[in-house]
């Protein structure tokens, strides 16, 4: 699992975001939010601090999920992280 957390962090850094990032925390947040949701496409949001919030675009399947895009809103800046490329 550490590889997944590290991959999340690396993709976010490659998108130019310089704020604090924790791949495990992001993964766990997604898992908590999708618990008991039906299969399908979702847009979920997560407030991190007063001026930073995440927007997750993902698909939920029977046994897993696919995070397509993570958009980080940090103040006036917006960072788009595409996990499908």
Image (cartoon, grey):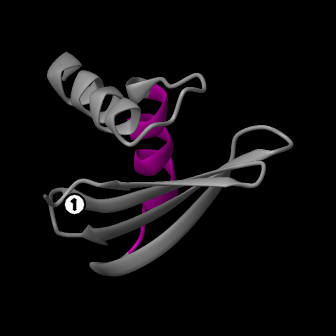
Along the line of sight, the residue nearer the viewer: 71 or 29: 71
Q: Is residue 23 magenta?
A: no
Q: Which region is colored magenta?
A: 25-37
Q: Residue 80: image x %, image y %?
A: 43, 57
Q: Residue furthest bottom?
A: 40
Along the line of sight, the residue nearer the viewer: 76 or 58: 76
Mark 1 Cα within 10 Å, few/some/many (few <14, many 20+)?
Answer: few
Dividing the picture into quadrants, the one containing residue 42 is bottom left
Q: Main secondary structure of the magenta part?
A: helix
**Element carrying mark 1:** strand
Q: Which residue is mark 1?
A: 66
Position of residue 3 relative to residue 17, above or below, is above
Whether residue 34 sits left or right of residue 20 in the image: it is left
Q: Residue 16: image x %, image y %?
A: 45, 37
- Which residue sits at x=16%, y=67%? 62
Position of residue 46 relative to residue 27, above or below, is below
- Which residue sits at x=18%, y=23%? 1
- Which residue sits at x=21%, y=17%? 2
């Amino acid at each position: 699992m550490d590889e997944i957390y590290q991959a999340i962090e690396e993709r976010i850094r490659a998108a130019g975001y310089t704020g604090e990032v924790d791949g495990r925390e992001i993964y766990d947040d997604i898992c908590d939010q999708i618990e008991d949701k039906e299969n399908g496409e979702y847009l979920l949001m997560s407030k991190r601090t007063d001026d930073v919030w995440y927007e997750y675009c993902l698909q939920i399947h029977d046994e897993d999920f696919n995070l397509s895009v993570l958009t980080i809103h940090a103040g006036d800046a917006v960072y788009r992280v595409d996990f499908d490329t």
